[in-house]
Image: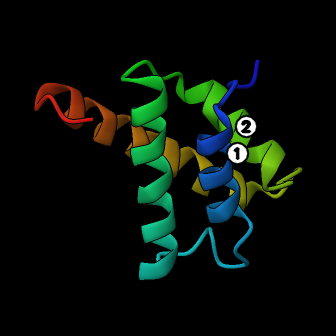
Amino acid sequence: MAVALTNESMKRLKAWLDRETWHTSHAIDEDYFYQFVGQYVTDHGYEFNEENMRQLIAQVAEIGERSGLREVAHERTALMREIIDFMKATGRR
């Protein structure tokens, strides 16, 4: 089951995933990713389901069966979990 995002969160997710290099570690791509994570926490709080987010990323990025991109989606959602846990523990939104 995919995640239902607010319009602002979806806009940030698409801004990140619409970049040709979203799956790389380029600083600009990482900035877009962090902006999405920040917007997600602002809109949705600390509740987070990694599997649902992976599915949403795969859908929006049209990953299909490309295992390399699936692995990147897995890594980014794991990082997102860590960031959200940090934000929760430190009271940040």
Horizontal side of residue 9 vs 25, given as left or right: right
Task: Check the image and report above or below for 4 versus 37.
Answer: above
Q: Which quadrant does the N terminus fall into? A: top right
Residue under pointer 2: 56
Task: Specify whether residue 26 is in view.
Answer: no
Q: Residue at x 61, y 26 (%)?
A: 51
Distance between the alpha carbons at the discs numbered 2 and 1: 4 Å
Foreground pick, 3 / 79: 3
Residue 9 on image: x %, y %:
59, 42
Horizontal side of residue 33 vs 91, given as left or right: right
The crowd level at tag 1 (other Cα within 10 Å; few <14, some 14-19, many 20+) is: many
Q: Residue at x 87, y 51 (%)?
A: 65
Task: Check the image and report above or below for 57 versus 2.
Answer: below
- Tell me whether the residue at label 2 lies in contact with that at label 1, contact meaning CB atoms closer than 8 angstroms: yes
Q: SS of the residue at dot 1?
A: helix
Horizontal side of residue 82 vs 38, given as left or right: left
Residue 63 on image: x %, y %:
82, 54
